[in-house]
Image (cartoon, grey):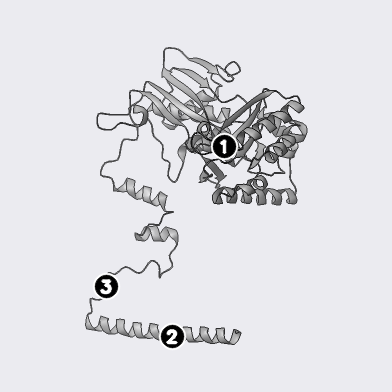
Amino acid sequence: VAAAAAGAAVAYTAIKVNEKKNADAKAAQKKADDPSEGRGQRSSVIMNNLTADSRADSGILFPHNHEEKMRRRIAARVSVEEENMTPRNSVTVRVPATSANVGPGYDCIGMAVDLWSEITVSRADKFEITAEGEGAEEMPKDETNLMVVGLKAAFQAANKPVPTLKYHAISRIPYARGLGSSSAAIVAGIIAGLVLAGHRLPCWGSEALLQIAAGIEGHPDNVAPAIYGGIQLGIHTGTRWMTERAPHPSGMQAVLFIPDFVGKTSDARGVLNATITREEAAFNISRVAFLVHSLCTGNLDNLKYGVEDKMHQPQRGGKLYNYLYPMIEAAQNAGASCAYLSGAGPTVMALTSGASGDIFTQREKERTDTGVAKAMLKVADAHGIKGQLLVTQPVHEGARVIKVDPHFSTDLITFRDNI
């Protein structure tokens, strides 16, 4: 068999060499007959084995060359829209809750959750912050509030002075529970500031808004999904923060047990080890790979392995949240695809499958969310932990403007919600 394979390879090579000689001879004859033949012709991109970047430069764009496509689109326009738009008088921004880490993705993976807060910022005669809803009483009412910090950063990017403003927050994201309330405030503040300042930022190839938000927060795992929605993977390239979206299967639901007590991120980070072993690093690397693969392929059976972790969950479960691992086990035994500590805690999130359309029109036994919720509540009761149980879902959409004065819509173009 080996000899036959070798003979076939030799024969194939000889044929290709002969074909090349014949082709070269024909080309030479054609060029001799017509001296202008071959002048000014482009070389073949494929035959020259160019890189992706040089392919884009040569005129051929591939699906992954989206940043190059955007560059050409902008460069080809006869008139470029003004960088500074008309400043606005007031704006309302809607921003989702987020669940960071998703198990092993410490400080680099996060997911947007269908649970929203809103902030309205308006020009005023005096500075004021008012709030209603979750954590309204604990929320800082001075310029240390992260809404204000984000807004100031936006005006700084626009190189404009910050006017006197009043802020009103309708908070539906539980405060300091591991659901990204701080990141939501930062992102909403930045977006509100950009709109009020009449300033726009580049996204493709720079993700300027993400740079501002992650610069304030210190990592991208919450701010990235708050900006873009979905499940985001974030890294720092050495020069800037960069994110990409990971898919999540349809029909996925999020079952959250949200304890009544506050979990401070500083306390949760304080219990972590200063170093990790090579074994722990390898464990988390393998789990992150399994997590992303499970999401990309829709293999929900592997999610329970993909969310395993040795960097932060064991330490936090052992020293802060003794209900964590019993609740994870109970949720998975009740049918959850996986369960993990959301962010720095204390919230525990389980992911389930089987939802189709509006869940209140679907037979309950086709889904697992109710059984998982009851199992999580049973563990909480056994550990004397009071809290609320919320059933929601991952959401593809990130923060957006829902109201503005004056409107962006015109007589010719109406934007969503007529903003």
| Spatial separation of the CA atoms under disc 1 and disc 2 | 59 Å
| Spatial separation of the CA atoms under disc 2 and disc 3 | 29 Å
Q: Quadrant of the C terminus?
A: top left
Of callouts 1 and 3, which one flags the residue occurring earlier in the amino acid sequence?
A: 3
Q: Which residue is mark 3?
A: 39
Of callouts 2 and 3, which one flags the residue occurring earlier in the amino acid sequence?
A: 2
Closest to the camera, between mark 1 and mark 3, is: 1
Circle 3 — which element? Answer: loop
Q: Which residue is mark 1?
A: 253
Q: Which mark is residue 15?
A: 2
- Out of 394 and 188, give the one closest to the viewer: 394
Closest to the camera, between mark 2 and mark 3, is: 2
Image location of residue 397, percent across then percent down: 47, 36
Image location of residue 319, percent across then percent down: 77, 32
Q: How many marks?
A: 3
Image location of residue 68, percent across then percent down: 39, 51
Can see residue 107?
yes
Can see residue 220?
no
* Callout 3 amino acid: Arg
In the picture as drawn, the residue positioned furthest to the top comes out as: 125
Circle 1 — which element? Answer: strand
User: Is residue 178 found left or right of 240 in the rendered image?
Assistant: right
